């Protein structure tokens, strides 16, 4: 965590994760309407999928290009 | 008869792995407790994923969704992020500090980091008090499975699980626990996914949209927040949804998962582990119980001509097993029960190992016998396993709550009480022992008050927030840790992590 915070790509990575977290706090206001996606996917599950996908993309870019430790 | 043979063979396979684990172990405390710090990526993945995916995931989580609708999935999204965060942010430093200084438990790491024996005692007791009831749900879950499958008393399943657990842990320790989890995890995942696909294929020929249509027509409140009203249980309003998400994020502090970071072979594993955690765990595995509990099980209960009418309360905990028993052939029901046993064993084994290490290393070795030999440590750990197992089974039989409530009302809030001093101790140089002790005591006191006085879940969440605030404020008001501690837990750890592997 300290290492990640020390350099610019790391700070950007943490900001992306923070924004996705805020998005997860904002999304539940839409859960009170019966939105169903793709015929089966409810809104709380879709919100989580998007959240996890953001983490996945951010992780893949940061950990495999800017990982702070030496391999 | 076939079921008895299959369950017997399953038990023999598990025992064989435990014996094999015993034969290849080095018979040292480090080997017994931390698998010689030699766990690789794939084993760690199975070890961790199926260490956290228990009978709670197979029974209680779908049962909770079945009664409350889909919003509780936010707890799982929080958990996934919490687990990943542990391995991304805190794991490497915790692993390096423990490896460099030969620490055998994460509580020992923090006790040394904060130079406090009092903190060691407080954390060990709080974590044990939170974890032992959680262990009890595993054997109770298998008991419920046996009951739903064969109509026998819950005690049969509890005894079967207890015997297997004792054999795995006493013989093989952490190494056998980790390796056995590969076998158990494969059975668990295959059973869980296989039963879901077979039930959908049999009951809903048009797939999940057909199940959604049934729910839309009969019980549309099961498709949205806040879900149906269930007396005495949360109504999923906006604050509750946010609350369960934040509670889920505390997963980074689940002690049996934190323990996993100490068993890792090298730092590169921390680079790759999140990939498996996010894709295989977060996206794939946890979608299975969600579909089971929020779509398939309620749609079956609410459709015309159902074989499984609507159930409520604790009975909802085994609705998945009842549906499997009613709709699938008997041989598959046996297979599904084996999956539940695998789920229970994989989690309970690592929880028991972690609890026993807290007793032997942090309480007995830390306070009464600091000059203990490796052999004594191993013996105490084994004795602790037996004692804790008896205690947890006693709790399961004495106080059979709905399974989901053991986790959300007791275990997770208790685990969260060491989260501030764990995270702060690893990444914040300014965190002090007074801050850590004050935070843990205040948070735990709030939690106990909430439990005794039956206060709302907001109070439980507030206990963690107050704990964190007290930790920060008291740390800033008290003298900073010594230079020796800064060098040991920050400078040396950073140098070690920056070295080429």
Image (cartoon, helix red, strand yellow):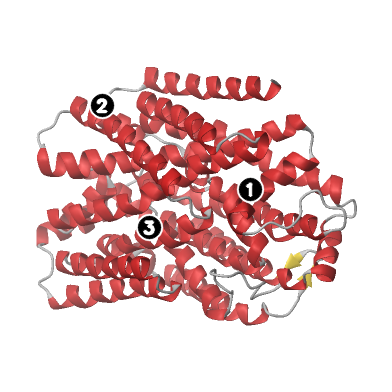
Protein chain holding label 3: B
Quadrant for residue B447, please give it. Answer: bottom left
Badge 3 marks a residue whose secondary structure is helix
Quadrant for residue B470, please give it. Answer: bottom left
Nearer the observer: mark 2 or 3; the answer is 3
> Quarter of the image containing the C terminus of chain B?
top left
The reply to the same-chain question for discs 2 and 3 is yes
Q: Residue at x 82, y 57 (%)?
A: B208
Badge 1 marks a residue whose secondary structure is helix
Badge 2 marks a residue whose secondary structure is loop
Q: Which residue is mark 2?
A: B28
Q: Which residue is mark 3?
A: B253
Mark 2 → mark 3, Cα distance in angstroms: 27 Å
Instruction: Give yes or no for contact between labels 2 and 3 (Cβ–Cβ under 8 Å).
Output: no
For marks 1 and 2, the one nearer the N-term is: 2
Protein chain holding label 1: B
Instruction: Give yes or no for contact between labels 3 and 1 (Cβ–Cβ under 8 Å).
Output: no
Residue A39 in view (yes/no): no
> Quarter of the image containing the N terminus of chain B?
top right
Q: Is A19 or B175 nearer to us in this picture?
A: B175
The location of residue B120, given as percent across then percent down, is 19, 53
Q: Which residue is mark 1?
A: B318
Mark 3 → mark 1, Cα distance in angstroms: 28 Å
Q: Is B249 or B160 nearer to us in this picture?
A: B160
Disc 1 crowd, CA 10 A, few/some/many (<14, 14-19, 20+): many
For marks 3 and 1, the one nearer the N-term is: 3
């Amino acid at each position: 965590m300290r290492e990640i915070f020390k350099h610019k790509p790391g700070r950007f990575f943490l900001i992306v994760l923070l924004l996705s977290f805020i998005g997860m706090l904002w999304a539940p206001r839409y859960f009170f309407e019966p939105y169903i996606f793709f015929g089966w996917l409810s809104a709380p599950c879709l919100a989580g999928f998007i959240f996890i996908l953001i983490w996945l993309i951010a992780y893949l870019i940061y950990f495999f290009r800017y990982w702070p430790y030496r391999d | 008869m076939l079921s008895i043979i299959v369950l017997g063979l399953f038990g023999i396979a598990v025992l064989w792995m435990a014996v094999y684990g015993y034969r290849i172990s080095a018979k040292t405390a480090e080997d017994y407790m931390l698998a010689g710090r030699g766990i690789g990526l794939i084993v760690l993945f199975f070890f961790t994923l199926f260490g956290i995916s228990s009978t709670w995931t197979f029974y209680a989580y779908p049962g909770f969704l079945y009664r409350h609708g889909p919003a509780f999935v936010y707890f799982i999204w929080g958990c996934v992020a919490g687990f990943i965060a542990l391995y991304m942010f805190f794991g490497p430093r915790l692993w390096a500090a423990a490896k460099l200084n030969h620490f055998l438990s994460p509580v020992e790491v923090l006790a040394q980091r904060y130079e406090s024996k009092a903190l060691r005692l407080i954390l060990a007791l709080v974590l044990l008090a939170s974890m032992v009831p959680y262990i009890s749900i595993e054997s109770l879950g298998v008991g419920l499975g046996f009951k739903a499958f064969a109509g026998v008393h819950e005690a049969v399943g509890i005894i079967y699980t207890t015997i297997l657990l004792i054999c795995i842990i006493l013989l093989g320790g952490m190494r056998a626990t980790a390796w056995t989890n590969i076998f158990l995890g494969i059975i668990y995942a295959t059973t869980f996914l296989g039963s879901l696909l077979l039930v959908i294929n049999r009951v809903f020929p048009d797939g999940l949209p057909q199940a959604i249509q049934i729910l839309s027509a009969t019980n549309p409140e099961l498709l949205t927040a806040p879900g149906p009203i269930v007396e005495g249980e949360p109504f999923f309003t906006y604050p509750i949804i946010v609350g369960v998400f934040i509670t889920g994020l505390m997963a980074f502090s689940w002690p049996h998962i934190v323990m996993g970071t100490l068993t890792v072979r090298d730092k590169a594993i921390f680079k790759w582990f999140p990939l498996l955690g996010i894709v295989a765990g977060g996206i794939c595995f946890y979608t299975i119980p969600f579909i089971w509990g929020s779509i398939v099980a309620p749609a079956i209960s609410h459709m015309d001509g159902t074989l499984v009418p609507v159930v409520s309360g604790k009975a909802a905990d085994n609705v998945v097993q009842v549906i499997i028993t009613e709709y699938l052939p008997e041989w598959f029901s046996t297979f599904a029960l084996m999956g539940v046993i695998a789920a229970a064993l994989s989690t309970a084994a690592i929880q028991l190992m972690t609890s026993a290490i807290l007793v032997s290393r942090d309480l007995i070795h830390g306070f009464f016998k600091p000059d203990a030999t490796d052999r004594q440590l191993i013996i105490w750990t084994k004795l602790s396993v037996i004692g804790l197992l008896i205690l947890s089974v006693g709790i399961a039989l004495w106080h059979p709550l709905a399974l989901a409530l053991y986790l959300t009302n007791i275990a997770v809030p208790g685990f969260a009480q060491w989260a501030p001093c764990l995270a702060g101790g690893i990444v914040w140089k300014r965190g002090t022992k007074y801050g850590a002790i004050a935070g843990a005591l205040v948070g735990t006191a709030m939690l106990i008050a909430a439990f005794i006085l039956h206060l709302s879940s907001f109070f439980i969440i507030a206990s963690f927030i107050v704990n964190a605030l007290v930790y920060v404020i008291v740390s800033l008001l008290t003298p900073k840790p010594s230079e020796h501690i800064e060098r040991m837990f920050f400078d040396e750890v950073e140098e070690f992590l920056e070295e080429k592997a």
